[in-house]
Amino acid sequence: MQTMSALPSPSDPPAVYRVAPDDDVAVALRDLAAHETITVGESTVVTTAAIVRGHKLAIRPVSAGQAVRKYGWPIGRATVDIAVGAHVHSHNLETLLSGTDEYEYAASNATEVSKPAAAAGSFLGYRRANGKVGTRNEIWILCTVGCVGRTAERIARLAAQKYAGRIDNVLAFPHQFGCSQLGGDLDRTRRLIAGLARHPNAGGVLILGLGCESNQLTKLLTEIPEAERERIRYFAAQATEDETEAGLQGVDELVQLAERDQRVPCGLDDLVVGLKCGGSDGFSGITANPLVGRIADRVTAAGGTAVLTEIPEIFGAERLLMQRAESREVFDGIVHVVNDFKEYFLRNHQPVHENPSPGNIAGGITTLEEKSLGAVQKGGHATVTQVLRYGERTTKPGLTLLEAPGNDGISSTALVAAGATILLFTTGRGTPLGFPVPTLKISSNTPLAERKSHWIDFDAGKALHAADPETVTDEFLQLIVATASGQPARNELNEQREIAIWKDGVTL
């Protein structure tokens, strides 16, 4: 990955930011007026039009048909001649993406990436019998099917009141699937729920079934090793006279087991962080995502695990991850998961480049390549050690690539099912969403952090004016450690906890 230049000094606040030395564009750090003279490195540029904060301007002339570079990589091609100082966006820049690609493995590339020194630090977590470490000690109520979702919520509400103070919380995670699904679509739903049932943040799990659904309890349980079923209770509502009473009895048994657990000192090697972005803007790839990437580097260097997902949001940047594949097997896994996802788009008659949302575009992101090159910054420089399919769980330290779409709810739930015990969620435009585990929201810009302080946990915008970005990384790591040790994240304080399931098959 291209090494970024140092962020600007607070003593001389610049008007624009160039990510890499050979970039053709720079990002406006404030609204720029037409015909304004600005400094870019050793040169001066005169804007040809007004440019909104977060958007791009040309700092080199670009001919029609020529690739335009940002992050040191092409983010698309110019559709017309672009003069120095011009606004670069949807009106004069188009994607280079079309369909699947062929890739060549180079074993030497995986060893060229420098690794940061291991980060010092520890948190207080719950070490489970299987060796996994949780950041919370909660009782989770899961459903095999959407028909019993409200029942699960009722049980959780009553139990949370009854057992307050004995464990961290009692939560239900209803969904709308589990029936009228066929083949692999149903298998994926089952695998995801089983992954959630095995999560270390749950000191106990109640699985509530209906009885007649496609996602039968008996088959779901086969996805959970017998050794891990001690803290799982389950029943089918159709076979129970009073499902609320049965649910509360199951929760009571689980609470008696879970409340024995106590927080103990754990190292960063016990941490599994999920990496996510949503509602990105032109600053996401400059401030928030690189900050999360530095955390991923520290956690993985310490022997921990970081999980990167949103496969459609690495299209155009996948080679950066392939260069860091630990082995030929991992490289092939990246190739297959990327091309399989592109084929999923094409089967449904959708272009593979259709990704930046209206909010992304308004924030200054033009093409999927630009969004992807900013998004993969969250993976830092760590070696990619494994590739997982949707619903699978992490099995080794390092950087994991997980199959899931870009949708915030679906991909974040997949990260949790894969084993992430805390989510690092960057955003340039803001969102209140939260998921089963603590979901730290990192704003890419300070105005968002100030305006939505009840959503945002950390302001990465301050990195724009930090003399050394690592001081911001140190501060953010302290927040992660405090959160992993029990300090509630904003999503927990706001009771924003939910799951979403990826359904891509036929509904009966």
Image: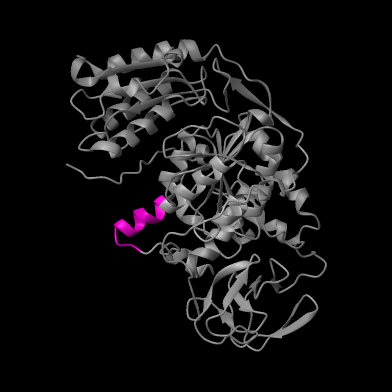
Q: What secondary structure characterizes most of the magenta part?
A: helix
Q: As displayed, is residue 185 above or below residue 96?
A: above
Q: Quadrant of the rendered structure where residue 410 is?
A: top left
Query: Front-most of 495 and 315?
Result: 315
Residue 51, image x, y percentages: 59, 79
Residue 401 included in the magenta stretch of the image: no
Give the residue drawn at x 46%, y 52%. 338
Q: Quadrant of the rendered structure where residue 352 is?
A: bottom left
- Decide if residue 52 is in sight here: no
Residue 396, image x, y percentages: 58, 31
Q: As displayed, is residue 144 above or below residue 97?
A: above
Residue 389, image x, y percentages: 44, 39
Side of 153 relative to 89 (left or right): left
Q: Quadrant of the rendered structure where residue 285 is?
A: bottom right
Q: As displayed, is residue 332 above or below residue 59?
A: above
Quadrant housing the C terminus: top left
- Decide if residue 2 is in sight here: yes
Give the residue drawn at x 35%, y 20%. 222
Residue located farthest toward the right when viewing the structure as drawn: 11
Tell me which segment is drawn in magenta.
340-350
